Each structure stands twice: as structure tokens, then as C-alpha cells.
Image (cartoon, grey):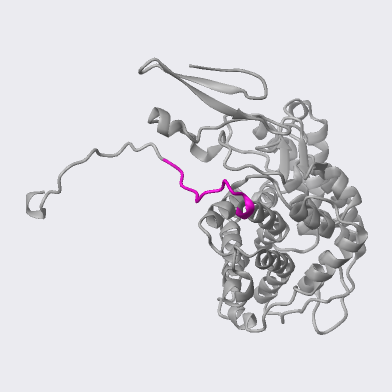
């Protein structure tokens, strides 16, 4: 039994029915969003832990970086709506915002972009590291290994107690991740690695390393570069999700930043986290043709049918995904730029989008196309294989991981992560010799 009181020094009263005692727990107010009950002294006072599988009702840290309101469809980076950033800003400016808390001045942005640009090259010996992988290695496996190995090549930025080391490591991770991703792609194709070009923007450079070859000049389409920049912006951070929590948990032990980001990549690799846009394409392939859409719509509405429309609705957003409208615009711009008119899978996707936005069943349940629906279509149109989808997600999310890691390191209240458990195994018992079992 419990109740709450309001006010600046609000407390939460917990009554223990086992002994009739009551305990006052402090309530910490958020600047926006739900308050939290401070349970740090709960075990010492009550001999009980809280039980929250998945930690979905537990605040693991205090953060000033990203805020989400899933019911209202709100996503803020340092207080600024994601829609405004996607429309008016670019990924480098968003990186600065996430890292430093404010939008940069023109001079600050130029200096930051220059610093990132001149960290994009990889140590030349890493090329040999890539060649140690099997030719058919999954690009995420390659990325996990290479990012973790960066600590073996950049010893001058692994002291987490040195602010300068942390800054250099942060810049290096943001700068080198597109190079690592593009090289993983090139390696899977058997094509030569393409080195970064300093005159190109972040998104342009990434596309250039992905698609150019030594045989001829590759012109980066401004429309595709803008779409890629938006994709990176929209995926840059998403509060305390599984991979971000993994980065923080690894970092709480004092692990170096390259190891922490590698751990985040491993967590992102899970299909329940970073594989949603790939699931969209698999679903479209299952539907097969526009003529089959009514049948699958009927299946989706049948609660007894296991079929689900992937890329519609969102676990966090109970309203329109605030990133989806921006991605929808980019999706149509990319399809127009590439002149794709007769691609059956993409035609099917556009028809499915139209039906879902007009069908009362989906509208009433707020099952709108989400960011993964459109990003999967964009990647498909650009010729990016599904094995690279999560890799691109990792490129975008690196800045969020790095910002969260830095915030955690600088938080004086942060301790090494050590979740508790509800033990339901055997009580103490004696060892039985093997001849008596």
C-alpha cells in the first residue's frame, strides 16, 4: 500500500503489510515527464528490492540528453524537437548538440566539422585486421570486432579520467564509424577499400566510401546525401534503449570507450532492437504483390492470426512516430531521384502505406508507418543490402552512445551497474558424493 504527496519535497509513503511499518521515499522531479521514486535506500530500510524485469519501470540514471513522450509522439534532443532538427539542421550540428548541450555557433560548427573530418581515416594496419575475417562474415560481426580493436591502436585516448582523452575518443568514434561501416561493406563485395575524402560532408563521405570504386569518379547525389543525413539525425539517440543502456553498463565498470561502443553495437545487433527495418522488407517479400495486400490486411486485423504488419506502430510511440513524417518525405524524394517506378517491392510498400493511412482500423489504433518502415524502403532503393541495415543504424547511434557515455562518466552519483535478482532456486543444501547419488 502506498500514497504520494505533492510539492517540492514530495515523498512516497510505502507501507509494509508484513510489520505495519511505513517508509518515506523521496520523489525526484523531472524537468518534463514522469517523476521517479528514489529507492536507493529501500533495501537498507526494508530488506526488500524492487522487481522490474526489463527495467521498463526503473530509471537507471539521470540524463539531460534526450526526452521521449510516447503517448504524445514527442522526441527531443536537448529540448529541441526532432522534426525541427531534421528540417533545419544537419547531422554534424546534431552531433555537437548531443555532445555539448547547445547548438554551435558558425565558428564552433566549422571547428567541430574539421576535427571530425581529420579523424575519419583508420590506422593502416586495421586494413589487415579486416582481411582476417571470412569473406562472408556478417558486417555487424566485422563492426563489433573492429570497433573493439580500436583501443589497441589508439592508446592516447583510453584514459577515461582525462577529459581530453574522452573528447578525442568521442571524436574518433564518430569520425571513424562511417569508414568502418563502408569498409565492412566493401569487404563483403570483394571490392577495394575507399579512403575518406576531406572535401565531402559526413553523409557524402559515407556514400562515397560505400559506392565509389577506383575505376571511375563517383558523384554523390545531393538528394541521397540529404536523405542519409536525415536518417543519421533521426537515429542519433533514443534515450535509455537496450544498446544505450549496454554502453552505460559497460562504461560503469571503467571500460575504455571503444570497448563500450563495441558492446552497444553487439546489443543493437539483436533483431528485437536494430533489425526492425529488415523485418519490414521481409514482410513485404512475404506479401509479394499489391494484389495480395487485402488478404494480409485481413490477417493483420485477425487477433488469432500470428501475422503482424512490421513497420507500423511503435513500442514506445503510442501516437505517430515523430520521425516518420520526415522519413516519409525523404523516402519519396529518394524514389523520385532514382527514377524508381516499376520496382514491385517498393510499389507494394507505397500502396501499403496508402491503405494504412486511410483504413479506420489502423487510424483508430494509431498504427501509423514508423521510421523503420521508411528507412528500410530507402535503403532498398539505394541498393543497400539488408545485412548492412543495422550497421547504418550503428553509424547513426554512435554519437548518442558517446554522449550518454560521457554524461555517465561525469556523473558523480554513477556507480558500477549491479542489478539485483529474485532468487527462486534451491536453499542451502549439502554436497552429495558421486557414489551416493
Against 185, is 296 above or below? above
Majority secondary structure of the magenta segment? Answer: loop
Left or right? Give the position of 284 relative to 49: right
Please state the horizontal and vertical placement of residue 374, each as a whole percent of the image: 78, 48
Residue pictured at 57% horizontal, 36% vertical: 306
Residue 406 in magenta?
no
The front one of 398 and 203 is 398
Against 332, is 33 above or below? above
Left or right? Give the position of 221 relative to 165: right
Against 31, is 252 above or below? below
Please state the horizontal and vertical placement of residue 326, each as a whole percent of the image: 85, 46
Count of numbered marks: 0
Residue pictured at 67% horizontal, 37% vertical: 316
Left or right? Give the position of 271 relative to 278: left
Please state the horizontal and vertical placement of residue 246, each as a whole percent of the image: 56, 52
Q: Is residue 329 visible?
A: no
Extent of the magenta region: 409-420
Residue 417 in magenta?
yes
Q: Is residue 65 visible?
A: yes
Left or right? Give the position of 228 relative to 64: right
The front one of 65 and 225 is 65
The front one of 339 and 124 is 124
Amino acid at each position: 500500500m502506498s500514497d504520494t504527496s505533492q510539492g517540492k519535497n514530495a515523498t512516497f509513503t510505502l507501507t509494509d503489510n508484513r510489520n505495519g511499518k511505513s517508509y518515506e521515499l523521496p520523489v525526484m522531479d523531472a524537468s518534463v515527464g514522469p517523476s521517479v521514486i528514489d529507492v536507493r535506500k529501500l533495501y537498507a530500510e526494508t530488506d526488500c528490492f524492487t522487481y522490474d524485469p526489463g527495467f521498463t519501470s526503473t530509471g537507471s540514471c539521470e540524463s539531460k540528453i534526450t526526452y521521449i513522450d510516447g503517448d504524445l509522439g514527442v522526441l527531443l534532443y536537448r529540448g529541441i524537437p526532432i522534426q525541427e532538427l531534421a528540417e533545419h539542421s544537419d547531422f554534424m550540428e546534431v552531433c555537437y548538440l548531443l555532445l555539448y548541450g547547445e547548438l554551435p555557433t558558425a565558428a564552433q560548427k566549422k571547428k567541430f566539422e574539421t576535427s571530425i573530418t581529420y579523424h575519419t581515416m583508420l590506422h593502416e594496419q586495421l586494413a589487415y585486421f579486416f582481411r582476417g575475417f571470412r569473406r562472408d562474415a556478417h558486417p555487424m560481426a566485422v563492426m563489433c570486432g573492429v570497433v573493439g580493436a580500436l583501443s589497441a591502436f589508439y592508446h592516447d585516448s583510453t584514459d577515461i579520467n582525462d577529459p581530453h582523452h574522452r573528447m578525442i575518443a568521442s571524436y574518433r568514434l564518430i569520425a571513424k564509424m562511417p569508414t568502418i561501416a563502408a569498409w565492412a561493406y566493401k569487404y563483403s563485395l570483394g571490392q577495394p577499400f575507399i579512403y575518406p575524402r576531406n572535401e565531402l560532408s559526413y553523409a557524402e563521405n559515407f556514400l562515397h566510401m560505400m559506392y565509389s570504386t577506383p575505376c571511375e569518379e563517383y558523384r554523390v547525389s545531393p538528394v541521397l546525401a540529404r536523405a542519409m543525413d536525415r536518417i543519421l539525425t533521426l537515429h542519433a539517440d533514443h534515450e535509455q534503449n537496450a544498446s544505450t543502456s549496454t554502453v552505460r553498463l559497460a562504461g560503469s565498470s571503467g571500460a575504455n570507450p571503444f570497448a563500450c561502443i563495441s558492446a552497444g553495437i553487439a546489443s543493437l545487433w539483436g533483431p528485437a532492437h536494430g533489425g526492425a527495418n529488415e523485418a519490414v522488407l521481409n514482410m513485404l517479400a512475404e506479401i509479394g504483390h499489391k494484389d495480395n495486400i487485402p488478404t494480409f490486411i485481413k490477417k493483420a486485423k485477425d487477433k488469432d492470426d500470428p501475422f503482424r504488419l512490421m513497420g507500423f506502430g511503435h513500442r514506445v510511440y503510442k501516437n505517430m512516430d515523430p520521425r516518420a513524417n520526415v522519413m516519409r518525405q525523404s523516402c519519396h524524394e529518394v524514389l523520385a531521384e532514382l527514377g524508381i517506378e516499376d520496382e514491385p517491392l517498393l510499389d507494394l510498400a507505397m500502396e501499403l502505406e496508402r491503405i494504412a493511412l486511410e483504413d479506420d482500423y489502423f487510424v483508430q489504433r494509431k498504427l501509423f508507418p514508423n521510421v523503420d518502415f521508411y528507412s528500410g524502403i530507402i535503403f532498398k532503393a539505394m541498393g543497400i543490402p539488408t545485412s548492412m541495415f543495422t550497421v547504418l543504424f550503428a553509424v547513426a547511434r554512435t554519437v548518442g552512445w558517446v554522449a550518454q557515455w560521457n554524461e555517465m562518466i561525469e556523473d558523480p552519483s554513477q556507480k558500477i551497474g549491479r542489478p539485483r535478482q529474485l532468487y527462486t532456486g534451491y536453499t542451502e543444501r549439502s554436497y552429495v558424493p558421486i557414489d551416493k547419488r
